Image (spheres, rainbow, N blue to C red):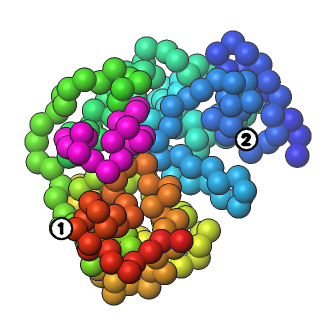
Amino acid sequence: MGLINVTINNQTIAVEEGTTILEAAKKLDIRIPTLCYLNLEHVKTVNGSASCRVCVVEIEGRRNLAPSCATPVSEGMVVRTNTLRCIKARRLVVELLLSNHPTDCLICEKNLNCELQSLAAELDIRRIKFHGVRATHEKDISSKAIIRNMDKCILCRRCETMCNEVQTVHVYSAVNRGFDTFIAPALNLPMDKSICTFCGQCVSVCPTAALTVVNEARDGGHGKNGSCS
């Protein structure tokens, strides 16, 4: 493959064909915020669904903002990652995610270790700007190892990538469409009736508390004899 010249925030670099804007920016030590993006380099697997649009950037000559995690560079491309337009777009995305998210951060399993929470703090989002109907789902506590709380799912699809492409178990997939979309085992079966092997790898990549490991102290012994390796 040949090298392609791209300029990001007034810095020029030559990268291999097929490199995304996000990857090129990292080579220049330019940080672009991400949420759904996940690069499992050790197993050569990338979750680049671009579903959240947090990593949008401006490309000279293009009208619309582009998701840097899924947009390959092209010769002579000029990119700006930190413009006011980009920042406003990212804030809007996170504000919309928060509008459909529980507000129990202080008692949440992932408090201070939640990527959505961290990103909201980075973007200085201090209040829920939008109010309306929230998607609600029954918490799945059928398993002795993993709890599914889809009220906290942001549809990043990381669990799908980990389960389907890395672990090759193929438990998770999207159910329904639009606002009613959520991630679940086939036929929306409870976890204990699914083909899940309870390896816990989906939990390890979940950015929020949509997937958590059963904690006997916290969950009143619900997970007795259960484990995640």
Q: Horizontal and vertical percent for residue 35? A: 46, 42
Q: Which residue is mark 1?
A: 138
**Could you tell me the amino acid type at mark 1?**
Glu
Seen in the picture, residue 179 relative to 220 is either above or below; the reply is above
| SS for dot 1 | loop
Q: Residue at x 58, y 19 (%)?
A: 80
Displayed quadrant of residue 184: bottom left
Q: Residue at x 50, y 58 (%)?
A: 204
* Residue 109 colored in magenta in the image: yes
Q: Is label 1 or label 2 in front?
A: 1
| Residue at mark 1 to residue at mark 2: CA–CA distance | 41 Å
Mark carried by residue 19? 2
Q: Residue at x 19, y 41 (%)?
A: 103
Looking at the picture, tell me which residue is in the foreground, 88 or 194.
194
Residue 202 can be seen, yes or no: yes
Residue lying at the far front of the rendered structure: 217
Q: Horizontal and vertical percent for residue 91? A: 35, 27
Which residues fall within the magenta stretch? 103-119
Seen in the picture, residue 58 relative to 69 is either above or below; the reply is above
Q: Horizontal and vertical percent for residue 58? A: 53, 24
